[in-house]
Amino acid sequence: MSFEELDNHVREISSIMFGEGYRELMGTGSPYPVGEELPKLQRMCYVEVPSLFQPFTLTPHPGSFDPMIKSLQKALDKLCYGSERDDPIYAEDGPYPANLDLFKMATAGDLIQDWVGSAAMAFKADFIDPFPALASNQFLIVSALKSALRAEQEVWAKMRDDIDAVAEAAVKCLDAMHRTCGGHEWRVALTVVSAGAGFLAAVPNLGTAAVAAAGAVAGGASLVASAIEVPEPPELTIQGSTVAGVFTSLYEAVKRVTEEVNSAEDRIARALRALADAVRADRAAYVANRPALADATARTVTGDDYLGYAS
């Protein structure tokens, strides 16, 4: 089975469930239960079962995240200073080639070394010198954002696997009822719980790297204080000795998949909020101050407040 065939799976569940339910009604030997319960059975099989699965057909396709991920990969190409070439979370996305344009900043100081203006000296101390650390920290931030998209992509990919596994277990359980006339159970381990685990585990470690890179820039950048715990994947059971019993366990399983998807989304959102809060709290480690030279004009640029005069 595959998620692309979910509609077919749902129709199969409805059909088998109705057939088994009808046999149960006929097995009573009384026309009253048949006439009274048949409409309920039809509604359960052909309305309620499709309704359980319908929301999953409206979820994002995992491939829809690829353009955004590639866009951030291009940003990492631009920010790669050479010291941070490998993706700190998803190694398969690296290594990134160093952007040679960034190295021009290291020699920019030579162009103003003979100038004695206060803005010229501040430009070197506050902008040129910390530039490699700033570029490195921005590389880490963009990497974290890209990895968050990877985590989102993983949520929807694993959700598809899980809901398909639930549907398959339901088909097998119903089919076993027909063949052996007894109660059966089929287990499904939810994988969506682990979606984004690599991102959630790596983000706190990025803070350590930012501290090392920032050095005198901020003296203590920290992205996230602690890792967000990912629980153990639960195991669902599809079971029942009657059609109603199977439907109840199917309903609970689908409900649990939905809850775990929401929980995985919440963990990713919490990590991103913590990331944003940390950057706002330690902005100087990630964003350079506006150079005072930006306010100079052709008339004032050689004044004492800016470049000064050549010594």
Image (cartoon, helix red, strand yellow):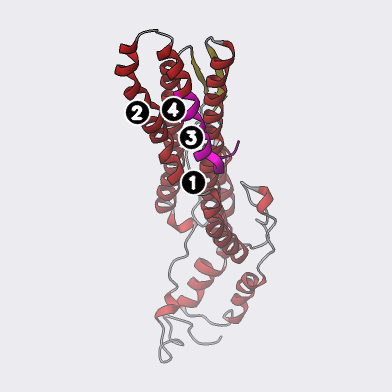
Q: CA distance from mark 4 to mark 1?
A: 32 Å
Name the secondary structure under disc 2.
helix
Question: Which residue is tagged 2?
Answer: 43
State left or right for residue 41 relative to residue 13: left
Which circle's residue, 2 or 1, is located before the other in the chain?
A: 2
Query: For mark 1, does the 10 Å Cα neighbourhood hold few (<14), some (14 to 19), or many (20 or more) residues?
Result: many
Mark 1 in CB contact with mark 3 (< 8 angstroms): no
Question: Which residue is tagged 1?
Answer: 223
Mark 4 vs mark 1: in front: 4
Which circle's residue, 1 or 3, is located before the other in the chain?
A: 3
Q: CA distance from mark 1 to mark 3?
A: 48 Å
Mark 2 vs mark 1: in front: 2
- Which quarter of the picture shows residue 76? bottom right
Report the quarter where the C terminus lies. Answer: bottom right
- Residue 266's place in the image compared with 220, above or below, is above
Residue 11: mark in rendering: 3
Mark 4 in CB contact with mark 1 (< 8 angstroms): no
**Three-letter residue code for mark 4:** Arg
Query: For mark 4, does the 10 Å Cα neighbourhood hold few (<14), some (14 to 19), or many (20 or more) residues?
Result: some
- Which quarter of the picture shows residue 75? bottom right
State yes or no: residue 13 in magenta: yes
Residue drawn at point x = 51 percent, y = 80 percent: 116
Report the quarter where the N terminus lies. Answer: top right
Q: CA distance from mark 2 to mark 1?
A: 52 Å
Query: For mark 3, does the 10 Å Cα neighbourhood hold few (<14), some (14 to 19), or many (20 or more) residues?
Result: some
State left or right for residue 271 relative to residue 199: left
Name the secondary structure under disc 1.
loop
Tell me where the magenta segment starts and ends, as one range. Answer: 1-18
Residue drawn at point x = 41 percent, y = 46 percent: 273
